[in-house]
Amino acid sequence: MTKPLSVLLIEDSEDDAMLLERELRLGGYLPALHRIDSAIQLDTALKKTDWDVIITDHNLPGFSSESALRMVHEAELDIPIIIVSGSIGEEAAVRAMKAGASDYIMKDNMARLLPAIERELRDAEVRRRQRESEKTIRHLAFYDPLTQLPNRRLLMDRLEHALLSSARSKHYGALLYLDMDHFKNLNDTKGHHYGDILLKQVAMQLKSCVRDEDTVARLGGDEFVVMLEDLGLDADHAAIQAKVIGDKIVATLNQPCLLNNYEHYSSCSIGVALFHGDKSQLDHLLTQADTSMYEAKKAGRNTLRFFDPTMQKTLEERVDMENALRQAISKQQFQLFYQIQVDTQGYPLGAEALIRWRHDSMGMIPPSDFIPLAEETNQIETIGQWVLETACLQVKAWADCPFRQHLTIAVNVSAQQFKQHNFVDIVQKTAERIGIDPAKLKLELTESMVLINVEDAIAKMKRLRALGFYLSLDDFGTGYSSLSYLKRLPFNQIKIDRSFIVSATFDSNDAFLVHIVISMGQKFGMDVVAEGVETQEQFELLEILDCKAFQGYLFGKPMPIEDFETFLLSLPNPSTATTYIA
């Protein structure tokens, strides 16, 4: 009866290989023999197949048994290696055995080959069983037998390493302590077997909610812990990430599940504690998370709570603002304020439209508080579209007024808006639907926005210019400010950032930069607006530097449309204004 044998043969002689295969067949084996003769071939062979035995010649052209032994050792493989050689000295044989060779056999004494192979296969099987036994013992020591998740012992070991890693990287992590709500009721009514099925499902659902590198552990009963690492350097951002995952877990475990055809509804309460590399927290971290979990129970279950009351309050405020933001348009809480832009004589040239949010209970909320939130929650496109439509309606309203029909309105475009593949079509259709002259609408883009994908930006900007829209480069000087790309981007206008204007009166370098920007804009055929002009001294300096358009508190603060139109009446008669368009 033949026995299969997978053999990797390192031999440069085909005749010797045939003799070796014949010897194995005579000994009752059915060898699957793969012959190689170089280090490159050995490296490939060790990665592709599980070998029962490696048989190698001692000396080959450019290769040797010693090199083969070293490569197998570096690969950390437990494969018997038998040297079969026509000439191997005693010293070389001793070195080979010390290096890991199982045996060496002279080619003129092949009778020793089969007993050596059988001995080594038996020993290899003993080692394999020993490894499996050790693996089983380790698994029982560190893993929960029901869910196969890490147990408390392994969790604490990983948590200790996580704290040390956090101390080095300064990154925050989080511990989520989870308890199933009313789990005892299931055991009492349906039996522990149903409870075990639920716990297994919970284990799988928890793993599906987190990253591969995160740890999900079962402490016992219906209590689980999720450990999240590398949540960033900022505590608030780490808390937000932990809350997102916690909310995902709550929502996932709130779905009905089948337990032996019995539809069961369950929920969980979660306590969250952040950690930041302080090893002394190790003993207290689980307690903190456990304590906050009970706060979640007190709050009505099926929710999560943070250990830090201040952070919990911050997150609750953020959630409240996010929910309110989603309703702001339908509740008509957004409002556009307008800030005047004038020429050197103080004649009105147009205005920049600036969004404001007037909440019923939170009052006036500045854009710096809600625009980043709108971007994070993917609401910025909807808000941006509202701004665009509202500004276009105002342009339309001014079109029939002789003293206002020349005014332009500038709107800020967000990076997410501009990134939309159909952004140009959206702007065009909005302007056409409302019926405005596109030249009266200025689209303000930032440097960083257009440099995300320069070629795509140029293509969109050229289409917008061809349709008659006016393009303004906002906050010039705060980004890359490279002339090499500026001359390629088809802007109509440059807006010098207020940070240069503020310091230009006392810093000659900034004053020179402003002069360069103004001259450069004129060379490129672009208009230049100085924004953030707040003092008469700044205005007079900008006039000397040949700037022709201005925006800032010196000329007027942002104000609602009713106040803005009243304010326009106090300005010089627009009918005699310069032809310069800002």
Image (cartoon, helix red, strand yellow):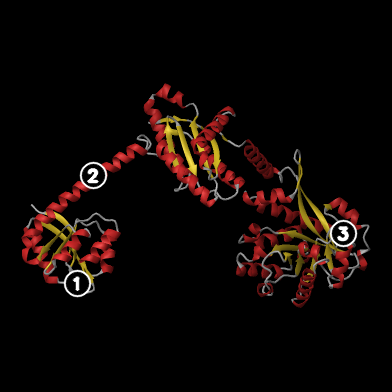
Q: Nearer the viewer, residue 501 or 105?
A: 105
**Residue under numbered circle 1:** 60
Q: Nearer the viewer, residue 424 or 290?
A: 290
Q: Quadrant of the C terminus?
A: bottom right
The amino acid marked with disc number 2 is Gln
Q: Residues within 10 Å of mark 2 (few under 14, many from 20)?
A: few
Residue 264, how many percent across, how many down?
45, 30
Mark 1 secondary-structure assignment: strand
Q: Residue at x 87, y 72 (%)?
A: 544
Q: Residues within 10 Å of mark 3 (few under 14, many from 20)?
A: some
Q: How many marks?
A: 3
Residue 211, how many percent across, how many down?
47, 47
Name which quarter of the figure residue 193 lies in. top left
Q: Residue at x 74, y 68 (%)?
A: 468
Residue 106 is left or right of residue 171, and the answer is left
Q: CA distance from mark 2 to mark 1?
A: 35 Å
Residue, far front:
91
Q: Nearer the viewer, residue 430 or 444?
A: 444
The amino acid marked with disc number 3 is Leu
Q: Are marks 2 and 1 in contact (CB under 8 Å)?
A: no
Disc marking residue 554: 3
Q: Say if 19 sits above or below 230 in the image.
A: below
Residue 301, how many percent across, how many down?
55, 30
Q: Say if 138 sits above or below 510 in the image.
A: above
**Residue under numbered circle 2:** 130
Residue 159 is left or right of residue 316, and the answer is left
Residue 264 is left or right of residue 399, and the answer is left
Q: Residue at x 83, y 64 (%)?
A: 550
Query: Is residue 324 in sight in this rendering?
Result: yes
Q: CA distance from mark 3 to mark 1?
A: 89 Å
The amino acid marked with disc number 1 is Leu
